[in-house]
Amino acid sequence: MPERIVAVRKNGQGSIKEMKLSSGTVVDYKTAHEMAKNGEIEHVQLINGKDGELHLRSQPDGDPTNNLDNMPSF
């Protein structure tokens, strides 16, 4: 069963650096990116950013409370 992101940790500039998964495991952004790419995290997707890089984001569902930037911090 795929994991879910339940909380995030940001750096001083407000960028997400780590994510806490539903199992309690903490992963860095790069690991979460790879897990999402492999279908191991649900309700997220990879998008092409303006910088040409792939970025992780929550799947749009009209509920801003579950956007990655709005997740609880840990």
Image: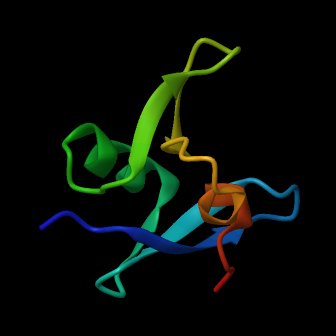
Residue at 42% x, 47% y is 44
Pick the front one: 19 or 41:
41
Quadrant occupied by the C terminus: bottom right
Measured along the vertical axis of the image, is residue 50 above or below residue 72? above
Relative to 59, is 52 on the left or the right? right
Q: x and y percent of residue 20 in the render?
A: 47, 77
Q: x and y percent of residue 60 in the render?
A: 55, 41
Relative to 55, is 50 on the left or the right? right
Q: x and y percent of residue 30 in the render?
A: 44, 48
| Picture quadrant where residue 34 is located | top left
User: In the image as oriented, which residue stretches furthest toward the front?
Assistant: 62
Measured along the vertical axis of the image, is residue 36 above or below residue 48? below
Relative to 65, is 22 on the left or the right? left
Residue at 50% x, 54% y is 29
> Which colour scheme appears in the figure?
rainbow
Q: x and y percent of residue 18 in the render?
A: 55, 66
Relative to 37, is 72 on the left or the right? right
Residue at 51% x, 41% y is 56
Residue at 42% x, 38% y is 45
Measured along the vertical axis of the image, is residue 67 above or below residue 36? below
Quadrant occupied by the N terminus: bottom left
User: In the image as oriented, which residue stretches furthest toward the left?
Assistant: 1
Measured along the vertical axis of the image, is residue 4 above or below residue 22? above
* Total residue callouts: 0
